[in-house]
Amino acid sequence: MIMFLTILLIVSAVFLVIVILMQQGKGQEMGAVFGGSSQTVFGASGAGNFLTKATAVIAIIFMASAFFISYISAQKEKGINISSKYTAAKTVKSSMAVKKAPVKNKSK
């Protein structure tokens, strides 16, 4: 599932860049971008409305796939149970305690 969402994220990112770069700047027509031709690629009304809607849809797909990837990844992480870690560390410490050797009396 994460692989599919990752591929969807990458593809939507590429298409988002392409659609944004195809949009016209302020005061320019789409024909001016493609060599000044009077015939536009998307008809007489221009591509503004289509590209704006396409940008919104692709951006929603991009954000949703990024959200679901992070959600699924967070669900796979298992929480740490601190009390069990503390008990395990305490057990190891007590079993590895060093016993002192008996002290010999040096007075003769």
Image (cartoon, helix red, strand yellow):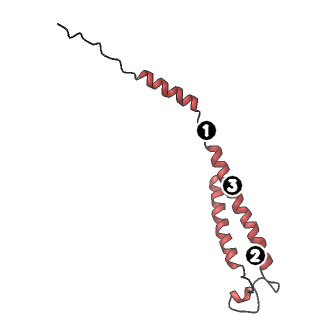
On whether residue 11 falls in the magenta region, the answer is no
Q: Residue 1: horizontal and vertical position, in percent?
A: 66, 52
Q: Nearer the viewer, mark 2 or mark 1?
A: 1
Q: Earlier in the sequence, mark 3 or mark 2?
A: 2
Q: For the point 72% across and 62% down, which residue is it?
A: 61
Q: Earlier in the sequence, mark 2 or mark 1?
A: 2
Q: Which residue is mark 1?
A: 79
Q: For the point 53% across and 31% down, which residue is it?
A: 85
Q: Which residue is mark 2?
A: 51
Does 56 sit left or right of 71 as displayed?
right
Q: Report the span colored magenta.
A: 36-45
**Secondary structure mostly seen in the magenta stretch:** loop
Amino acid, disc 2: Leu
Q: Residue 51: horizontal and vertical position, in percent?
A: 76, 75
Q: Which mark is residue 30?
A: none
Q: Are marks 2 and 1 in contact (CB under 8 Å)?
A: no
Amino acid, disc 3: Phe
Q: Estimate the spatial distance between the alpha carbons at disc 3 and disc 1, rounded to whole Å.
A: 20 Å
Q: Which residue is mark 3?
A: 67
